[in-house]
Image (cartoon, coloured by chain):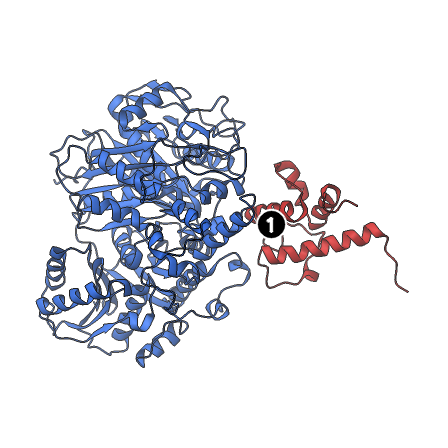
């Protein structure tokens, strides 16, 4: 019997999965699948080869698709540390995800 | 003992947000005024408010010319005031050409190609050359924010080596949405205006301007100062960020001083690139600290002018001459508290100070660095340059056409079959590592694939250190995508990745990063003669201290932009793209094929006679010359055919002529594939090894390249 996840966890999983797909699309990571991305791994300078310009492209995507503005360097560094941290920040700040 | 020719600055045409001409500029600089203000709708109306701070000139656009062209024409008129000589060449550095006008046409959904005739970067140099009746080459360099400095460096080389007596050179860029929103998307714009070197600086202010210098080796006209030396380098580090230790910047500064035979201790003032971005100012400071144990007076004027991109280096070269003439150093406008991390002590307020030598720095995207040394007229010039340098020897070759990579393309050409078309993207990138080229658009992928294949073909262990690249249109996909996304979001969102990829030198910068090529890196944009312009750049900058260079040209076909921009492509023309390139070295190697540029000038009736003279100087009868590959762009068919006919009759040649565009299809850098064809025909012994092949260009330009075994 499968474990039933509570609603916030399901929302978070969906968000992380969405973000993985969006990342592959906007950063043209055509050689990997969403499943191959570890949301807890270091995002910038990690295995995916993501650098500062990619982060800025993600900043635009996060504002456009989730209505979350990230224009502070210190917040940016924390938010883009891992994909899970990014999802967490979006969930807490996105007017589009507010229930 | 002979001394090197002094290269005098005989005229300056300077237009910046500080004013028009040297006097207005001097007064503004001495008052330490910043001209940075919120964008005014007279240039364009930003859809998002508040408008960002920019450096805007008071120049009114004179339709139908785009604003960049208007600025260039006005600067040229100022520079040529009181001068009777006609320049032998015009060299313009520009990053965006007529794009401000293009942006408006695209918004209005204008589909008439004639309206887009000033889009091309090279149309700026053409307008200036036309106005001045210059029949020599009108050259265009596009190396991002170092473009104007590279243009002056190119003029210096041409004058020193006797290729010209008078050259009008410099840079120009107008404000436009592409750069206004592009730099903003990279979070490189300071919302309060640029404050270079300040501890709280947050970035640059995008600006506009034009500066053209009339340079000459003629001692007759009064001279403001002389250009003593130049140095180019490439960071080969990142598409948009400087090397953190300023490694490339240091190399360019050192090269400029070595080239000018001057010691660091002899520099009186350094005009900093000093954009005000946190990274640039730190990297530049580190480079200066490494080269100058006790740095001289130094300051950035970009807190006063903003950063006018391609124009900035030429504006600052003009201001260097002004500092020497007036004996003063401009202040570092906008900087209140110097960033201790920079470790430098910039001159914060303008001051009277005797200046005899200035080092002027310009660094740009793609890691393209260029520095100039400007000196007082009586400063001794360095020793003479080598007047007969060794030939450019081809070590490896590669091309991409609609038929595929080199082997497939040349295989089909050998069967006299057309190779025109647009190669499938997967086949195009088949040998490129997926991850390292994931951000590259079609234009850059073509260029990177050609460079990689040319290196493999050469069999050399090491990559060359320099890159000379030509492109008629640059990265059309990224430019189109950037502007589309901007328009669709009512100017709210723009893509930093598309912006970085859209610059004309993005491909050459990528080649440098992949191959760690830290030497000179120049992108030339000369329409249908872009490869020939790249060859001219290689000829001037590749010396025997270099390990060699990638010399290439490439263009991408774009279903929307190609028929709008390129007059040789109509809605019915089948699209074609690709390019060709070589690994070349400046060494004579017996048994190897050399490439030589024997002619490159704008077409006029008299130029045709001069081209015949240049090509037949050593008497290429049928015995010496086996074949001609002739390039006539479709838009110039009628004129080009007549020119070719006259050429053949007057040169007295009765040899086979191949119209190479019938094979390659219509695209700006088709002549680079013709160059590969010429080498292929020699290597396959289709022609005798003691005879040469000419690749000639007709139409708006007359060009001649010669290929032969040494």
> Is residue B260 in view?
no
- Which residue is under mark 1? A45
> Would you identify the image quadrant in which residue B372 lies?
top left
> Would you identify the image quadrant in which residue B539 lies?
bottom left
The image quadrant where one finds the N terminus of chain B is: top left
**Left or right: where A27 falls relative to B65:** right
The image quadrant where one finds the C terminus of chain B is: bottom left
Residue B519: image location, x then y, percent: 36, 49
Label 1 packing within 10 angstroms: few (<14), some (14-19), many (20+): few
Residue A13: image location, x then y, percent: 77, 54
Q: Which chain's colour is blue?
A: B
**Left or right: where A2 falls relative to B106:** right
The residue at 52%/47% (across/down) is: B486
Residue A61: image location, x then y, percent: 62, 49
The residue at 66%/50% (across/down) is: A42
Q: Colour of chain A?
A: red
Q: Chain of mark 1?
A: A
Instruction: Say if B432 sits above or below B297 in the image.
Output: below
> Would you identify the image quadrant in which residue B573 lies?
bottom left
Q: Secondary structure at mark 1?
A: loop
Q: Nearer the viewer, residue B278 or B221?
A: B221
Residue B488: image location, x then y, percent: 54, 50
> Is residue B479 in view?
yes
Number of numbered markers: 1
């Amino acid at each position: 019997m499968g474990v039933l996840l509570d609603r916030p966890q399901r929302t978070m999983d969906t968000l992380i999965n969405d973000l993985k797909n969006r990342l592959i699309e906007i950063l043209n990571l055509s050689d990997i699948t969403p499943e191959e991305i570890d949301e807890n791994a270091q995002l910038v300078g990690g295995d995916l080869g993501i650098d500062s310009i990619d982060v800025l492209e993600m900043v635009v995507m996060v504002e456009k698709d989730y209505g979350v503005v990230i224009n502070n360097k210190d917040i940016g560094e924390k938010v883009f540390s891992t994909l899970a941290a990014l999802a967490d920040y979006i969930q807490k700040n996105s007017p589009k995800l507010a229930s | 003992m002979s001394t090197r020719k002094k290269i005098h600055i005989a005229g300056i045409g300077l237009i910046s947000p500080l004013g028009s001409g040297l006097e207005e500029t001097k007064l503004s600089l001495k008052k330490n005024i910043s001209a940075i203000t919120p964008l005014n709708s007279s240039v364009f109306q930003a859809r998002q408010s508040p408008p960002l701070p920019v450096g805007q000139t008071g120049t009114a656009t004179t339709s139908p010319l785009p604003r960049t062209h208007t600025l260039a024409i006005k600067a040229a008129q100022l520079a040529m005031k009181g001068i009777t000589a006609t320049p032998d060449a015009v060299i313009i550095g520009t990053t965006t050409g007529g794009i401000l006008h293009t942006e408006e046409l695209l918004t209005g959904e204008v589909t008439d190609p004639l309206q887009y005739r000033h889009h091309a970067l090279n149309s700026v140099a053409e307008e200036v050359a036309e106005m001045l009746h210059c029949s020599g080459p009108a050259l265009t360099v596009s190396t991002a924010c170092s473009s104007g400095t590279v243009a002056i460096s190119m003029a210096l080389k041409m004058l020193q080596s006797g290729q010209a007596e008078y050259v009008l050179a410099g840079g120009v860029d107008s404000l436009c949405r592409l750069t206004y929103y592009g730099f903003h998307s990279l979070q490189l714009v300071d919302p309060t205006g640029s404050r270079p070197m300040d501890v709280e600086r947050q970035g640059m202010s995008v600006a506009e301007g034009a500066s053209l210098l009339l340079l000459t080796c003629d001692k007759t006209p009064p001279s403001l100062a002389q250009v003593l030396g130049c140095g180019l380098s490439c960071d080969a580090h990142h598409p948009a960020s400087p090397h953190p230790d300023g490694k490339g910047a240091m190399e360019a500064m050192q090269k400029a001083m070595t080239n000018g035979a001057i010691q660091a201790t002899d520099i009186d003032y350094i005009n900093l690139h000093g954009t005000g971005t946190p990274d640039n100012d730190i990297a530049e400071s580190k480079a200066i600290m490494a080269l100058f144990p006790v740095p001289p007076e130094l300051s950035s004027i970009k807190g006063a002018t903003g950063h006018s991109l391609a124009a900035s280096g030429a504006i600052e070269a003009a201001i260097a001459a002004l500092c020497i003439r007036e004996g003063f150093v401009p202040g570092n406008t906008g900087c209140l508290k110097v960033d201790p991390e920079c470790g430098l002590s910039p001159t914060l307020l303008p001051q009277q100070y005797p200046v005899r030598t200035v080092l002027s720095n310009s660094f740009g995207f793609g890691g393209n660095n260029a520095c100039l040394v400007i000196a007082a007229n009586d400063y001794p010039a360095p020793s003479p340059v080598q007047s007969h340098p060794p030939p450019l020897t081809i070590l490896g070759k590669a091309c991409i056409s609609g038929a595929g990579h080199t082997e497939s393309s040349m295989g089909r050409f050998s069967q006299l079959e057309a190779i025109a078309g647009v190669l499938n993207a997967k086949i195009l990138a088949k040998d490129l590592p997926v991850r390292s080229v994931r951000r590259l658009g079609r234009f850059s992928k073509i260029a990177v694939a050609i460079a990689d294949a040319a290196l493999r073909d050469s069999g050399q262990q090491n990559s060359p250190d320099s890159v000379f690249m030509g492109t008629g249109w640059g990265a059309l996909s990224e430019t189109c995508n950037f502007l589309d996304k901007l328009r669709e979001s009512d100017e709210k969102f723009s893509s930093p990745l598309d912006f970085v990829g859209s610059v004309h030198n993005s491909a050459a910068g990528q080649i440098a990063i992949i191959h760690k090529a830290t030497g000179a890196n120049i992108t030339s944009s000369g329409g249908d003669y872009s490869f020939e312009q790249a060859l001219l750049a290689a000829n001037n900058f590749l010396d025997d201290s270099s390990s060699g260079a990638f010399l290439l040209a490439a263009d991408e076909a774009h279903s929307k932009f190609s028929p709008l921009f390129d007059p040789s492509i109509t809605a019915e023309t089948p699209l074609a793209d690709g390019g060709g390139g070589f690994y070349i070295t400046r060494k004579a190697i017996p048994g190897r094929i050399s490439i030589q540029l024997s002619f490159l000038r704008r077409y006029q009736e008299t130029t045709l006679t001069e081209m015949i003279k240049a090509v037949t100087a050593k008497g290429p009868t049928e015995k010496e010359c086996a074949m001609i590959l002739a390039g006539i762009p479709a838009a110039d068919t009628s004129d080009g055919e007549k020119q070719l006919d006259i050429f053949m009759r007057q040169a007295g040649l009765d040899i086979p002529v191949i119209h190479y565009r019938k094979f390659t299809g219509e695209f700006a850098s088709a002549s680079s594939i013709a160059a590969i064809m010429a080498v292929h025909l020699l290597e396959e012994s289709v022609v005798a090894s003691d005879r040469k092949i000419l690749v000639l260009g007709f139409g708006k330009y007359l060009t001649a390249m010669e290929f032969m075994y040494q």
